[in-house]
């Protein structure tokens, strides 16, 4: 049976919302008490129009939403949350780590973006690529919002609705605040951007204590660790991702994602030899078609592959005053 139909049978409607950057982002309407919207889409007129239209088709008005539940910090998921909560008089719920992050906006986001721009430059990106990243992030900040959570969930805490219970569990890597919500009574899990079989989960850079290239590898390591936990602990039933269609057998897809990560990492070896190269130089060898605006995404993808290869001793890192370069080990 189609996974969307399986979700409908369990009282959950997927609403795919348009964005100006990617094809669509999912939010989910849980028909329960309280009437709950999981994620909200971007703070953009086209997204709001599409959300209201989809709700009407399902027999609801935006003002009937009682609760907005957020999976993580990225603006394509939280952007409309403040507006929806204000219009509907709805509560906003999220993990305590995300609540702390929201409480530091907007200064924390601007500081994080400036730090990331500096790290991209340190990995060899020229000024044009850094400027393209900064412009993209400025646009993303304009499409965000600052929802104020009134329901803050501790790690492992359960959010009780009338007919179901959602257990909040951190799965960091894509972002530090990635949270999955498991409804074991209906054998499903809202996986957000932690696990998306039809889209690649990118581990985004976050400031680390040392501020060097080793810290840049940490999100990829955390993502692998999180996928490993999901492969062991997740229900085997329905997965409801932040992008793309729902899927069945969450644990099996987590294992497949780990296998796919390793296959992609091993393919990177073809672009490596004994000559040390910066991360940007490797991206130009492997993704020469990328525009300046998307080159930083390629750099993040290669960092994830390098983290695994370094962990297995298949790549060496060379650090000097110019930064860090990567090569195959000397014979």
Image: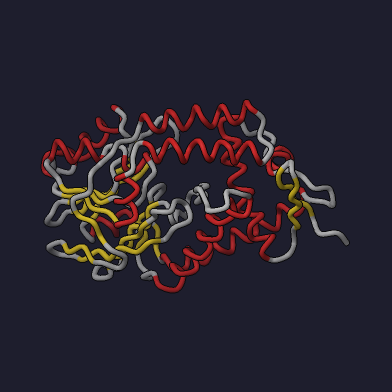
The part of the image, by quadrant, that contains residue 234 is bottom left
Q: Which colour scheme is used?
A: secondary structure
Q: Which of 184 and 74 is in front in this view?
A: 74
Q: Examine the image and state in which quarter residue 125 appears.
A: top right
Position in image of residue 301 (x %, y %): 59, 48
Residue 136 placement, left or right of 264: left
| Relative image position of residue 138 (x, y in whole percent) | 44, 29
Would residue 218 appear left or right of 141 to someone viewing this image? right
Residue at the right extreme? 331
Identify the residue shown where x is 69% and y is 66%: 312
- The answer to whether 139 is drawn above or below residue 16 in the figure is above
Residue closer to the observer: 235 or 56: 235
Q: Residue furthest bottom?
A: 232
Of the pair 266 and 10, the residue shown nearer to us: 266
Q: Which residue is drawn at 20% across and 54% down?
A: 151
Return the x and y of residue 257 as percentages of the image width and height: 53, 60
Q: Quadrant of the N terminus?
A: bottom left
- Residue at left offset 62%, top offset 26%: 128
Asked if 281 appears above or below 305 in the picture, the reply is above
Looking at the image, residue 191 sits to the left or right of residue 152; the answer is right
Q: Is residue 185 above or below residue 73?
A: below
Quadrant in which the C terminus appears:
bottom right
User: Percent x, y for residue 93?
Assistant: 23, 52
- Disc count in the image? 0
């Amino acid at each position: 049976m189609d996974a969307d139909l399986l979700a409908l049978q369990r009282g959950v409607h997927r609403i795919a919302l348009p964005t100006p950057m990617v094809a669509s982002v999912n939010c989910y309407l849980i028909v329960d008490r309280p009437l709950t919207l999981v994620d909200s889409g971007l703070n953009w007129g086209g997204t709001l129009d599409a959300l209201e239209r989809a709700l009407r088709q399902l027999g609801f008005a935006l003002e009937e939403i009682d609760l907005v539940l957020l999976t993580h910090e990225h603006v394509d998921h939280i952007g409309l949350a403040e507006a929806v909560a204000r219009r509907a008089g709805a509560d906003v719920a999220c993990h305590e780590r995300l609540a702390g992050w929201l409480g530091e906006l907007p200064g924390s986001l601007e500081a994080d973006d400036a730090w990331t721009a500096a790290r991209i430059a340190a990995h060899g990106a020229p000024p044009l690529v850094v400027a393209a990243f900064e412009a993209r992030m400025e646009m993303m900040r304009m499409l965000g919002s600052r929802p104020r959570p009134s329901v803050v969930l501790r790690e492992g805490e359960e959010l009780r609705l009338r007919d179901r219970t959602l257990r909040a569990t951190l799965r960091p890597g894509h972002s530090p605040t990635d949270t999955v919500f498991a409804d074991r009574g209906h054998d499903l899990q809202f996986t957000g951007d932690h696990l998306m079989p039809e889209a690649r989960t990118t581990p985004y850079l976050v400031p680390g204590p040392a501020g060097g290239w080793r810290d840049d590898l940490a999100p990829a390591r955390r993502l692998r660790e999180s996928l490993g936990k999901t492969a062991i602990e997740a229900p085997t039933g329905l997965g409801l991702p932040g992008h793309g269609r729902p899927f069945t057998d969450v644990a099996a897809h987590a294992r497949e994602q780990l296998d796919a990560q390793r296959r992609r990492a091993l393919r990177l070896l073809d672009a490596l030899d004994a000559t040390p190269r910066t991360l940007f130089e490797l991206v130009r060898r492997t993704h020469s078609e990328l525009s300046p605006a998307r080159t930083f995404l390629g750099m993040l993808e290669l960092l994830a592959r390098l983290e695994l290869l370094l962990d297995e001793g298949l790549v060496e890192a060379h650090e000097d005053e110019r930064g860090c370069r990567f090569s195959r080990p000397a014979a």
